[in-house]
Image (cartoon, rainbow, N blue to C red):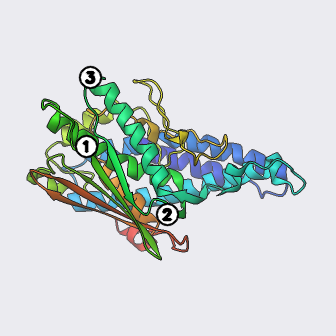
Amino acid sequence: MSHVYGLYYKAFETLRRVQEIKTVEDNDRYCSIISEALREHLTVIPRLAMGVLECQDLMRPEDMDKFMNTLLRSRISRRVIAEQHLALTDTFNSPWHFPEAKNQLETNADFVGEVFLRCNAREVVEGCGKMAQDLAKQAYGTKCTIPEIELQGDLDATFPYILSHLEYIVGELLRNSIQALMERYVDQPGKPPPIQVLICEAPQHVIIRISDQGGGIQRELLPYLWSFSKGPRSQTRLKNLLQVPKMAATMQELQTSRFGSTKASDTKQTKGNHTHDSSLSSLTSRPPNLRLGMGLPMSRVYAEYWAGNLELQSLEGYGVDAFLQISKLGNKNEQLTTRASVDAI
């Protein structure tokens, strides 16, 4: 916790000394400061998670979870603002930005900063699913049969969204489903049942349902499903967190250091050459047996930040249905915690 406090204090002291920006050169220097701060803060999430687990006997679990949710939402907000400024600066400095440019890149034209105007749910599911399947093959061996992912519903549904946020949520849900199926059917002959993904488009939102037959969630784990602190596996989670070098609160590029290289940005929705140094790659591309216990609560924070929602329905002994609701109109305010709530923690 002291390490995180030191990082935020240093960032505050650095940014408050920045002079008024009057020229393009001033903005370039400011962008360098922002980029450096973003890189330094890549260790914040694992440090916070470890601090929460270490302090679990000093505070009530509900207070600790409220602290984590509040801090994560404000952190996501700051990173979105910072990365949006960097992305818009990149756009301004790009040759295709100028009106006389003849060869404009279509992929860049679909972005406003970090916001992808034509985010397609099917392509996100396919990209994240392939990445999760590749990780499973590398972890369990090529002889194991990896569950297939079947899509149905409104496959052409598009909406404006920050692509990295949706990739993280969908990636975590598919990862959980694949892992549950592999563990349940690893010693059984034949193929495991497929993961069913249904995309439903409504006037104001898109709902993605991910259904598996991985046996469901154990009853004793259900009360801690959305908690960052308490739980029967908290000590195991603390040890596993020490193996994750860096995690960031955004994700544009996924890379694996232990199993080679796997990128979710290989989908059609990649924004040109614009990527960020983001260590959610370390989180999402971790080995399947490295369980951190924070994927679901973090995914819900991401979903609710843009006025969405994430719910799970578990049938113990059968499987899990995950329901992700996404606001599609792009006119919803961020769900931030008020300053009074922050001060009350």
Residue nearest the viewer, comparing 142 with 54: 142
Q: Is residue 120 left or right of residue 69?
A: right
- For marks 3 and 2, give the CA distance: 36 Å
Task: Quadrant for the N terminus, please.
Answer: top left
Which quadrant of the structure image shows residue 128? top left
Q: Is residue 296 visible?
A: yes
Which quadrant of the structure image shows residue 236? top left
List the residue tagged with mark 1: 54
Q: Secondary structure at mark 1?
A: helix
Q: Secondary structure at mark 3?
A: loop
Residue nearest the viewer, comparing 207 with 305: 207
List the residue tagged with mark 2: 157
Location of residue 282 in the rendering, given as x and y in whole percent from the top left corner: 42, 35
Q: Is residue 112 visible?
A: no
Location of residue 92 in the rendering, given as x and y in whole percent from the top left corner: 78, 53
Which quadrant of the structure image shows residue 265? top right
Q: Residue at x 55, y 70 (%)?
A: 330
Q: Residue at x 21, y 54 (%)?
A: 320
**Within 10 angstroms of label 1, few (less than 14), some, or many (20 or more) residues?**
some
Q: Are marks 1 and 3 in contact (CB under 8 Å)?
A: no
Which of the two discs, 1 and 3, sits closer to the camera?
3
Task: Quadrant for the C terminus, please.
Answer: bottom left
